Image (tube, rainbow, N blue to C red):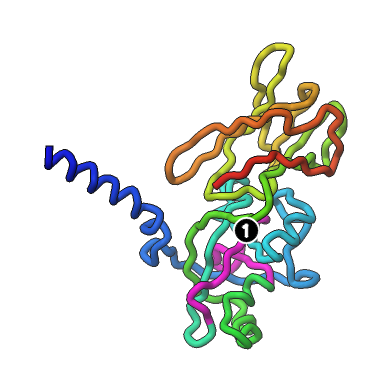
């Protein structure tokens, strides 16, 4: 009995340590980062993820374009801690950025907004860091946190009521990837799969009539799960409106 208890206590201890291990210095990946210019040094509303204005201002404009980490759009909305490695210029914490766009640089994993790039610098040294143009960095994926905001589903601007519906998830918390999205069709009692149109945009021609139940599959380090939300999209949905799900991923 004593050996059995020791096994379970040991296993429990490992489970408690997992989050700390996942975000320890040993799990940072070495790469390079550069930056792009934009009005007000924020993100761009025309990013490949399809976030529009949200992609310009989310996270205070600390956003990034990525290439390898884009993963055909699955990487949209993911958060990464990125810290530069220039002696005397960089903080230990670096900056947390949200992926909002696709972009390839000079052997870089990240093309940061100017404000995000500057936030990696120590106080009063942002201009010195920016003068490098491209810097060595370390990065790791971290949970996205949006205090006071629930997950929202926005009816994308390309939608046309009632025959074509495109949705995009905003304020996607935690460390999850959305890999499938489905809508419930009441008259045939079935879930209908949406298509990933591009980036983080999911669409469907001739969608079910609302109000719409939405379910989506998320994957993470710990596996995958389905989340079902009832009556998220109203019957008379409006293009450009973001509907609050009253739910958040953690």
| Residue at the image position 68 percent from the left and 51 percent from the top | 149
Q: Is residue 76 above or below residue 163?
A: below
| Residue at the image position 62 percent from the left and 58 percent from the top | 98
| Residue at the image position 74 percent from the left and 72 percent from the top | 41
Q: Splitting the image into 4 quarters, where does residue 7 fall?
A: top left
Asked whether 214 or 34 is in front, the reply is: 214
Q: Position of residue 74 (x, y in %)?
A: 59, 45
Q: Which residue is mark 1?
A: 98
Is 101 displayed left or right of 14 in the figure? right
Please identify the quadrant where the N terminus is shown: top left
Asked whether 131 or 171 is in front, the reply is: 171
Numbered marks: total: 1
Tell me where the magenta segment starts and ends, as one range: 90-114
Is 240 displayed left or right of 109 in the figure? right
| Residue at the image position 55 percent from the left and 62 percent from the top | 109
Identify the element where label 1 is drawn. Answer: strand
Other residues around mark 1 within 10 Å, as few (<14) / some (14–19) / many (≥20): many
Q: Splitting the image into 4 quarters, where does residue 35 fall?
A: bottom right
Tell me if residue 66 is in the magenta stretch. no
Q: Position of residue 79 (x, y in %)?
A: 57, 57
Q: Position of residue 221 (x, y in %)?
A: 44, 46
Tell me if residue 94 is in the magenta stretch. yes
């Amino acid at each position: 009995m004593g050996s059995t208890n020791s096994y379970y206590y040991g296993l429990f201890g490992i489970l408690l340590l997992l989050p700390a291990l996942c975000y320890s210095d040993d799990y940072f990946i070495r790469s390079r980062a550069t930056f792009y210019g934009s009005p007000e040094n924020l993100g761009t509303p025309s990013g490949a993820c399809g976030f529009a204005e949200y992609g310009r201002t989310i996270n205070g404009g600390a956003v990034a374009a990525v290439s390898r980490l884009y993963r055909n759009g699955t990487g949209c909305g993911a958060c990464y801690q990125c810290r530069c490695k220039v002696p005397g210029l960089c903080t230990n914490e670096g900056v947390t950025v949200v992926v909002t766009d696709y972009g390839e640089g000079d052997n870089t994993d990240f093309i940061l907004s100017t404000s995000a790039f500057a936030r990696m610098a120590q106080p009063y040294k942002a201009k010195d860091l920016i003068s490098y143009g491209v810097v060595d960095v370390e990065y790791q994926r971290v949970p996205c946190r949006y205090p006071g905001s629930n997950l929202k589903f926005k009816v994308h601007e390309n939608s046309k009521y009632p025959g074509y519906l495109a949705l995009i998830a905003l304020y996607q918390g935690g460390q999850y990837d959305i890999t499938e999205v489905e809508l419930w069709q009441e008259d045939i009692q079935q879930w209908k799969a949406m298509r990933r149109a591009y980036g983080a945009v999911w669409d469907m021609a001739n969608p079910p009539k609302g109000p719409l139940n939405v379910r989506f599959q998320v994957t993470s380090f710990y596996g995958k799960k389905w989340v079902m939300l009832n009556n998220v999209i109203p019957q008379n949905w409006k293009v450009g409106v973001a509907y609050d799900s009253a739910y958040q991923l953690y």
